[in-house]
Amino acid sequence: MTSRSASARQRPEHRQLLPRPRLVEGRPSGANGIRWDRIGRLVVLGVCALVVLLYARPLAAILSARGEAATRHAELTKLEREHSQLSKRVEALKNPAALEREARRLGMVKPGEKAYVIKGLPDSP
């Protein structure tokens, strides 16, 4: 028991106490006023914001181009359908009987025929 009490007494004597930091103008005595960790965070945040700004305009252009491409694709589909219908009509009008029927529908008559206009008839479906 004497050895323990002797070592317990030696601890406080060998322990050095560091001076307590003093506050001068709200800062610890060893601070130089520059917080590099905060500056680093601000720089990283600024670089990220710059990258976002640099990609914003091209991204908007890409999205606009995608919308325009969809519109153009729909217009192309419509024009292809119309072209198909017109091609079928051209093929149909190459037949002389179909050509004559279309001309009569437009009100044309053959040379030497007499045309009659009858008014007051109900519209035919």
Image (cartoon, grey):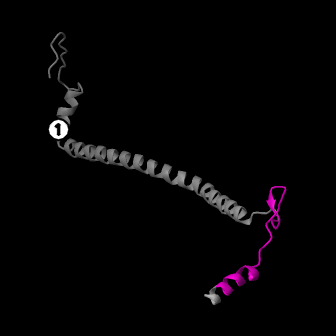
Q: Residue furthest top?
A: 120
Answer left or right for 76 relative to 112. Answer: right
Q: Residue furthest front?
A: 2
Using the rendered view, name the quadrant where residue 95 is placed.
top left
Q: Image quadrant for the C terminus?
A: top left
Residue drawn at point x = 27 percent, y = 47 percent: 84
Residue drawn at point x = 50 percent, y = 49 percent: 64
State whether residue 106 is above or below residue 83: above
Q: Image quadrant for the N terminus?
A: bottom right
Q: Amino acid at mark 1?
A: Ala
Answer left or right for 123 relative to 70. Answer: left
Residue drawn at point x = 62 percent, y = 60 percent: 48
Q: Secondary structure at mark 1?
A: helix
Q: Which residue is mark 1?
A: 98
Answer left or right for 15 relative to 101. Answer: right
Write down the region rendered in magenta: 5-31
| Nearer to the camera, 22 or 13 | 13
| Nearer to the camera, 39 or 93 | 39
State whether residue 112 is above or below residue 67: above
Task: Please state the horizontal and vertical placement of residue 24, each as a whole percent of the image.
Answer: 85, 59
| Nearer to the camera, 102 or 4 | 4
Q: Is residue 14 magenta?
A: yes
| Nearer to the camera, 21 or 117 | 21
Task: Please state the horizontal and vertical placement of residue 83, each as a whole percent of the image.
Answer: 30, 46
